Amino acid sequence: MAASLCSAGASAGAADMTVVAFGTSLTARGGWPEALQAALRQCLDRSVAVVTVAQPGATSDWAAGALDRVLAARPDVVLVEMAANDAALHRMISLSASRRNMSLIFQALASAKPAPRVFNMAMSPVSGVRGLDRLFLDSYENLHRKLALRTGGHFIDHRPAWAALPAQQLRAAIPDGLHPVPGAAAEVMVPAIVRAITGRDCGR
């Protein structure tokens, strides 16, 4: 499946702020980029385009080859999530391979002219069979966080917000054990992303 390269509304070139959501199916089918665009527009009272460069099943191998699509959007902000699939045993991306790919990605973003603000994100919890396939997810999340911070980036940790949900609500929000339903993803994650980007709590 080809990566998505589109905004949720106004074209990136016409917007006052361009945000690229760069990731896996958690981004490509997550529903939160569209909600983020609306929330940022309301919060900042400016035109904002959230551009999605993401692919279901993608790993950092794919992401390293998709950097040109990210940079082509001339983003002000890039949100990166790749740990969930790098950590999947059946994807066969070792920790050292993930380190190599993500170092390249974060360094390339930091070296762009002009350089965007980069936020690495730890996403939703994984359970069931998909959780067993990702036994070392925390190791990949921690690695990506360290690499982002080392290159001047930032970190958004969505895990505490998900963990705060009652067990029954969490199961309903992530019925397949990996992919949150779009409404839940937007409600849980968008406020934290807006705070990180704007520096204030705009409410929803």
Image (spheres, rainbow, N blue to C red):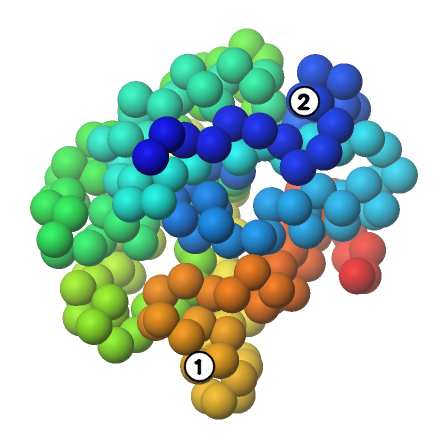
Callout 2: SS: helix
**Quick one: 162 or 182, which is closer to the camera?**
182
Name which quarter of the figure residue 3 lies in: top left
Q: Residues within 10 Å of mark 2 (few under 14, many from 20)?
A: many
* Residue 17 visible, this angle: no
Residue 123's tag is: none
194 to the left or right of 96:
right
Q: Position of residue 45 (x, y in %)?
A: 89, 39
Residue at 30 percent of width and 22 percent of height: 65
Mark 1 or mark 2: name the one nearer the start of the chain: 2
Q: Using a 10 Å C-alpha cutoff, classify the residue at mark 1 as few (fewer than 14 neighbours), some (14 to 19) or many (20 or more).
A: some
Q: Which residue is at a point 61% across and 64% down the rendered structure image?
A: 183
Mark 1 highlights which residue? 171
The secondary structure type at the circle numbered 1 is helix
Based on the displayed image, in which of its 4 quarters is residue 68 positioned? top left
Q: Quadrant of the C terminus?
A: bottom right
Q: Nearer the viewer, residue 34 or 147?
A: 34
- The quarter holding residue 73 reads top right
Q: Which mark is residue 12?
A: 2
Residue 132 horizontal/vertical position (percent): 18, 70
Nearer-the-camera pick, 85 or 10: 10
Pointer 1 and pointer 2: residues touching (CB < 8 Å)? Answer: no
Quarter of the image containing the N terminus? top left
- Up the image or down, 96 lies above or below 85; here it is above
| Residue visible at 39% across and 21% down in the picture | 67
Residue 74 location (% of width, % of height):
59, 17
Q: Name the residue type under label 1.
A: Arg
- Of the residues shown, which amino acid type is indicated by label 2? Ala
What's the distance in space between the residues labelled 1 and 2, CA to CA?
36 Å
